[in-house]
Amino acid sequence: IRKAVADRLLPMVEDSGWFFDTELLVLAERAGLRIHEVPVDWVDDPNSTVRIVRTAAEDLKGVWWVGRALATGALPLDRLSRPFGTDPRDRELSGVPGGLARQ
């Protein structure tokens, strides 16, 4: 993440736990930013103290919260209306019905 993007988006993220990155990605996508996946090599730590059930439950709550916030307009999307420039998905494409390119 670029510093200019982080400075703009991170203050809007409400979750301070494991789910913050998902919320950040949703906000970035809604701001019209491109998201890139970067592969990593995962090394499992058998001595991890992560509580899987509790973490999964918190993630499900986060998914519910973000979905509800999107549906009710609780996310500050008005502050994200293209703050980083135009979204290339908004341009007209020949032979593609309006709005379909965003999918």
Image (cartoon, grey):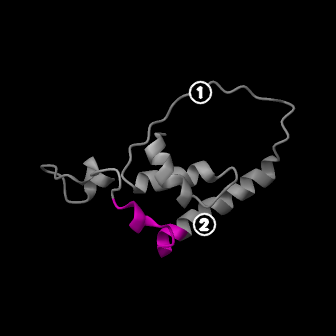
Residue type beneath disc 1: Val
Q: Which residues make up the magenta segment?
A: 69-81
Chief secondary structure of the magenta span?
A: helix
Q: Is residue 34 above or below residue 28?
A: above
Residue type beneath disc 2: Trp
Q: Which residue is mark 1?
A: 40
Q: Residues within 10 Å of mark 2 (few under 14, many from 20)?
A: some
| Residue at (84, 30) in percent of width and height | 46
Q: Earlier in the sequence, mark 1 or mark 2?
A: 1
| Residue at (67, 59) in percent of width and height | 60
Q: Nearer the viewer, residue 12 or 57?
A: 12
Q: Is residue 39 above or below residue 34?
A: above
Q: Which residue is mark 2?
A: 65
Quadrant in which residue 15 is drawn: bottom right
Identify the secondary structure beneath mark 1: loop
- Horizontally, residue 100 falls left or right of residue 64, namely left
Furthest toward the bottom, the residue is 72
- Where residue 2 appears, as percent x and y from the top left, is 46, 39
In the image, is residue 66 part of the stretch drawn in magenta? no
Residue 56 is labelled as none
| Residue at (83, 36) in percent of width and height | 48
Q: Nearer the viewer, residue 66 or 28?
A: 28
